[in-house]
Amino acid sequence: MKKKFLVGMVALASIALAACGNSDAGNGGSTGSSDDNSSSAGSKSLVVSTFGLSEDIVKKDIMDPFAKENDAKVTLEVGNSADRFTKLKNNPKAGVDVIELAQNNSTEGNQDDLFMDITEKDVPNLANLTDGAKEVYESGAGVPIAVNSIGIVYDKEKVGKDITSWDDLWSDELKGKISVPDITVTAGPLMMYVASDHAGKDIASDKGEAAFKAMEELKPNVVKTYSKSSDLANMFQSGEIEVAVVADFAVDIIKGAAENVEYVVPESGTYANYNTINIPKETENKDLALAFVNHRISEESQKAKALSLNEGPTNKDVELTDEEAENKTYGAIAERAEAVDFKMINENLSSWIDQWNRTMNN
């Protein structure tokens, strides 16, 4: 696979895509914060805007240790990435000290000069980022805190053979047996990269034209597209599908509904998506915010969340056993996971959504 990565955004279309972080569509619904979302009651305070995913675990594994170590009160503002980012854009002085976002929102924010520059001098753990995470950071997309990638989940018994390659998805034997992610969710644009590779074309060179031709060829095999992992799990459980392209964070959900499925990441490689953290320029708690970013990418914090929330770590010192690393973008899978060009994606996303709906959703 060819490396492709830059940063950027087209606002309207990216709102649909960026509703996703380590989720499919919403990451917690509407934005909100309250005293119930606070950790500790120290002499200092920090407001962290983050995904509304497993809040109890986030508090226990991430926020509480930081609050205790820094004698701080941490208040969470939770919701999906797009909603929280839009809120910050509309009111940069809203009191948010740190914000965790989907990669495309963070790139737009950096382009709009909403965020502070973060350097290794202020955040020493930047030196310990994985190579892929460093590439994202150096591009200006923020500090990566988690990584996921896509693969193929399938029922081997029903399919009757091993699936080992992305190209296998185009086999006539899989007619009416596949589901793929909708273009508006986390894995959707990554599927476009896969389709472009199948067509033998660099997606940036033709802005997705060959990818859409490949998707047209794939359509007879596709029962439907999906926007939620729970829908995908139900389709496997009911026997409606036998194969799907999926982000690794959703594999456990699917296996919970259909335990016979297998997950494979082709040896040719895969594509990755990062969640990132930034500090708004209007923060009144710069030093504490920098300390939080450093904590967030520390080896201890990264391992805790990798185990409790099935997130691929971005700190290179995190060590996971084979069992712990299962279904994560880690180790050999991380090494062959390529970042995508969010500038190119989001410059074309509006037209892609329209063409996708005409091609795949009619």
Image (tube, rainbow, N blue to C red):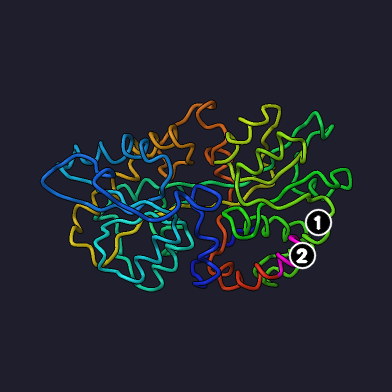
Q: Which circle marks residue 219 in the picture?
A: 1
In this rendering, position of residue 182 left or right of residue 65: right
* Residue at the image position 18 percent from the left and 62 percent from the top: 284
**What is the crowding at mark 1: few (fewer than 14 residues within 10 Å), some, or many (at least 20)?**
many
In this rendering, position of residue 317 left or right of residue 91: right
Above-or-below relation of 264 to 350: above
Is 325 part of what is drawn in magenta? no
Tag 2 and tag 1, C-beta contact below 8 Å: yes
Please state, as top left, top right, bottom left or bottom right, where the C terminus lies in the image: bottom right
Which element is circle 1 on?
helix
Above-or-below relation of 304 to 74: above
Q: CA separation, marks 2 and 1?
A: 8 Å
Highlighted magenta segment, given as a residue range = 355-362
Is 358 part of what is drawn in magenta? yes
Between residue 361 and residue 175, name the one nearer to us. Answer: 361
Q: Earlier in the sequence, mark 2 or mark 1?
A: 1
Query: Which amino acid, by three-letter code, is at mark 1?
Result: Lys
Q: For mark 2, what is the residue?
A: 359
Q: Position of residue 90 (x, y in %)?
A: 35, 71
* Residue at the image position 41 percent from the left and 36 percent from the top: 318
